[in-house]
């Protein structure tokens, strides 16, 4: 029996769709293109790719290689969906088809954009897949997870005609995304420990991981304020408050997860504010 379209959509984590497509459009806006560029067919097509197919790629591979851990994780069984081994080959087909459809279009782009897209496939794929399986290597797990978001933004930047280097933006993006990944691993500490999966959170423990996340958010906020407008650094305080609340209940997995459930909404709100700031520079 073929895996259904609805099943694939569940695997792709719709509540997280905004992350990848959001960083893509932030990269497009950061290039400060003409407003008409936002309606360019190529930009819209890749916006579609990073909205759904990219998440099928990321989370499909994740669920295929994480089965042994996921079956021990109550969050995965109750809050998301468990992908059984009998369905793995069907998900591989969905991953291959939805990615290969866009590759001919990628090859028509600039060398910088092509390199950024290939970097996305590398970091997003080998975050979960063997032989690298970065998610099982503390420190490397957060870096690979962050890197695939950041190179998506870099891809959007060069796709929209951006020029020059983007070092500071990459550093800010890596700090923010590494904190996002590390914090997301905290509610999984118990399940990952039982499955003998090492992550930055299992290695450092909940309290230290949360402290590292808070530091990374401060770094990201300072750089964002330097690059755009100083008051943007105040967004760091939203995350600092979230980290503070999480640290208070770090030993209570149920209460911690209730706080964590707000995390995607906070990220979407902050991303929206950042988009408005970039739009201001674009339009005025």
Image (spheres, helix red, strand yellow):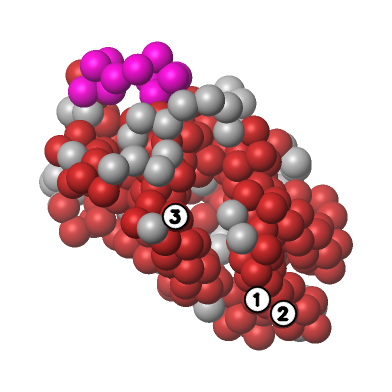
Q: Quadrant of residue 112?
A: top left
Label 1: which residue?
238
Q: Quadrant of residue 214?
A: bottom right
Q: Are marks 1 and 3 in contact (CB under 8 Å)?
A: no
Q: Is residue 282 above or below residue 137?
A: below
The CA span between labels 2 and 3 is 29 Å
Q: Are marks 2 and 3 in contact (CB under 8 Å)?
A: no
Q: Nearer the viewer, residue 79 or 279?
A: 279
Residue 171 at x, y percent in the picture: 67, 41
Q: Quadrant of the C terminus?
A: bottom left
Q: Is residue 189 magenta?
A: no
Q: Earlier in the sequence, mark 2 or mark 3?
A: 2
Label 2: which residue?
241
**Secondary-structure class at tag 2:** helix
The CA span between labels 1 and 3 is 23 Å
Q: Are marks 1 and 2 in contact (CB under 8 Å)?
A: yes
Q: Is residue 113 magenta?
A: yes
Q: Residues within 10 Å of mark 1 (few under 14, many from 20)?
A: few
Q: Is residue 126 above or below residue 190?
A: above
Q: Which disc, if any, is residue 22?
A: none
Q: Is residue 280 left or right of residue 203?
A: left
Q: Nearer the viewer, residue 120 or 282?
A: 282
Q: Is residue 175 left or right of residue 119?
A: right
- Which residue is the extreme one toward the front? 284
The CA span between labels 1 and 2 is 5 Å
The residue shown at (26%, 48%) is: 35
Residue 163 at x, y percent in the picture: 46, 26
Q: Which disc, if any, is residue 281?
A: 3
Magenta residues (range): 105-116
The residue shown at (20%, 34%) is: 42
Q: Residues within 10 Å of mark 3 (few under 14, many from 20)?
A: few
């Amino acid at each position: 029996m073929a895996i259904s379209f609805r099943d694939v959509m569940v695997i792709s984590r719709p509540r997280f769709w905004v992350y990848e497509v959001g960083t893509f459009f932030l990269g497009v806006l950061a290039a400060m293109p003409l407003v008409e560029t936002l309606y360019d067919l190529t930009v819209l097509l890749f916006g579609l790719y990073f909205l759904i197919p990219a998440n099928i790629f990321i989370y499909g591979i994740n669920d295929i290689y994480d089965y042994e851990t996921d079956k021990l994780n109550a969050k995965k069984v109750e809050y998301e969906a468990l992908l059984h081994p009998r369905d793995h080959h069907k998900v591989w087909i969905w991953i291959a088809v939805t990615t290969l459809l866009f590759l001919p279009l990628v090859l028509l782009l600039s060398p910088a954009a092509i390199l950024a897209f290939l970097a996305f496939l590398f970091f997003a794929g080998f975050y979960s897949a063997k032989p690298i399986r970065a998610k099982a290597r503390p420190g490397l797990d957060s870096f690979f997870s962050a890197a695939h978001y950041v190179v998506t933004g870099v891809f959007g930047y060069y796709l929209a005609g951006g020029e020059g280097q983007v070092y500071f933006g990459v550093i800010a993006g890596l700090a923010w995304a590494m904190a996002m990944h590390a914090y997301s691993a905290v509610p999984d500490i118990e399940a990952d420990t039982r499955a003998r999966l090492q992550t930055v959170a299992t290695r450092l423990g909940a309290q230290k991981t949360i402290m590292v996340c808070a530091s990374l958010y401060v770094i990201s906020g300072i750089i964002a304020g330097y690059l755009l407008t100083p008051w943007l650094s105040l967004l760091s305080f939203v995350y600092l408050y979230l980290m503070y609340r999480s640290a208070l209940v770090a030993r209570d997995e149920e209460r911690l997860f209730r706080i964590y459930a707000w995390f995607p909404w906070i990220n979407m709100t902050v991303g929206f504010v950042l988009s408005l700031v970039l739009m201001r520079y674009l339009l005025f």
